[in-house]
Amino acid sequence: MSSGLSQCLMKRSSSWLLPSTAALTRVDCRVWGSTSSATQDFTSFQSKPRTLKDLPHVSSLEMIYRVVCQGFYKRLHELQIYEKQRYGPIYRDGLKSVSVNTPQLLEELLRNDDKFPCRGDMSLWKDYRDMKGLGYGPFTVEGEQWYNLRATLNKRMLHPKDSAEYSGAISEVVTDFIKRVDYLRQCSPTGDLVTNLANELYHFSLEGIASILFETRLGCLQKKIPAGTQDFINAIGQMFTNSVPVMMTPKWSRHMLPYYHRYIGGWEGIFDFARELIDKKMEDIQQRVKRGQNVEGEYLTYLLSNTQMSMKDVYGSVAELLLAGVDTTSNTLTWALHLLSRNPRAQDRLYNEVSTFVRADQTPSAAAVSQMPYLRAVVKETLRMYPVVPMNARILSKNVTVGGYQFSKNTPFILCHYAISHDEDTFPEPFQFKPERWLRDGHKLPNAFGSIPFGFGVRGCVGRRIAELEMYMLLCQLIRLFEIKPDPTMGELKCICRTVLVPDQSVNLHLVARECDKVG
Ligand code: HEM
């Protein structure tokens, strides 16, 4: 999620250091021994409360060595596992934050979260808004203002029955995506190969979320993307690409180097495009009110007709919702299809479930996908293996005790979601794709805090239900129509941490039409 959240995480990504995969298997467990015994040792000497200074810690030099020399820079998610093995389930990282690394400790921390939870400094995201007098959105606003904003944003979005309202809009986008991939595969030399699927899924996710937020279609799935939409896509890329050097360089250099200027230019492109669509919708609503017509619509109409929100607030919130909702969903879909292509038995089981509920010539409804436990388990397992937001953060405004250690208020905590969702005690064979872990078929389900890919509590993801619906509907339709097979010319697919977990190479997959099923 290249979003506000990511900004705060990227700030730290830029200074974290990662080892090679081989190194992970031969780590020096000088402090804690193996992970599971570490947890036991850890809980056994908790009688006397300890403090921050008693924690095992990573020195700045060690951190720099790992990030720069051992190459963890792009694999911060793997660094979590490395450091957990080395320092135990809770330690001070090289940036002096406290890393929390087991489901139990994560639960202990999050259950003590503030009424208005805080993830950390978002000043970089605020710059453009401050310059232009625009409102803040859910990522950038804090405190009571944040709470009030979420109260408005949550309505019509957070409940499964709210997201079901958007299934018509999503269904249209799914249909167009299927047509687009069918066209691409037919153009390929083998007649079934789709190359760079992550890019196609990015267009799908942008089209999907924009159709809800702007109540209009952007044309991302057309053969030729309209120029304005392409500029918008470029502006998003420009903002994210330049945010990394901007964060890594001192403030005084901003006007000497090109990055800050480009970064702000990216925001300008994003807001100009969003503003135009929002203003158009507002005009439309005003005309309808003048004519005495009923004003009905979806999310944007709801926000615009809400008297609590000024236009500036609507611009700020819509932009942040949009940015949060694109590469989170698209990368999760990419990982899900990759995993299914490598696990034909899981794919067969999913196909059997899907074809029981949906005919090939039907688009699945929100009600149909809610009846498919295996489909939901596939998405849950994908997000466990590839939590697209691999780490998160919290700063509490009160003193808190976690794992027997007392921390004073304002201590920054890092939530190591990647390491936690690969915790062997919670998830045996953590690197194996096993959707059945999540089925309620009599066995005990894993600890709920072992995998919380959408976060937790009142500050959890506002777009969760929409993201899930988009992913269920698209996966359902793709699996119904095609058998997904790996491209044997591709090497081993690894993930790199670019704020969100992304594939390290272009993902190509064969989409072989299932017998008797026609596309479009
Ligand atoms: C697979 C898809 C997605 C994943 C895994 C995901 C994950 C997350 C996570 C981990 C957080 C932080 C939660 C916390 O701090 O406890 C978050 C926040 C957020 N997400 Fe998502 N997200 C996804 C899709 C979306 C979509 C589609 C939207 C927009 C409709 C969205 C909008 C947001 C917003 C606005 C926040 C900030 C909420 C706040 O600070 O109040 N996300 N998301």
Image (cartoon, grey):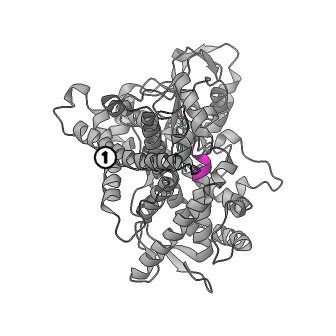
Residue lying furthest left: 256
Is residue 342 shown above or below 154?
below
The residue depicted at 65 percent of the width and 67 percent of the height is 364
Is residue 515 shown above or below 22?
below
User: In the image, 245: left or right of 309?
Assistant: left
User: In the image, 221: left or right of 268?
Assistant: right
Q: Residues within 10 Å of mark 1 (few under 14, many from 20)?
A: many
**Residue 396 coordinates in the image, percent (x, y):** 56, 21
User: In the image, 121: left or right of 396?
Assistant: left
Q: Which residue is mark 1?
A: 269
The residue depicted at 43 percent of the width and 60 percent of the height is 203
**Residue 483 coordinates in the image, percent (x, y):** 58, 76
User: In the image, 86: left or right of 361?
Assistant: left
Magenta segment, which residues?
Answer: 461-467
Amino acid, disc 1: Gly
Residue in the foreground of this view, choosing between 12 and 331: 331
**Residue 169 coordinates in the image, percent (x, y):** 56, 60
The residue depicted at 44 percent of the width and 58 percent of the height is 202
User: Residue 264: which quarter of the image?
Assistant: top left
Q: Is residue 143 magenta?
A: no
Residue lying furthest bottom: 516
Residue in the foreground of this view, choosing between 183 and 309: 309
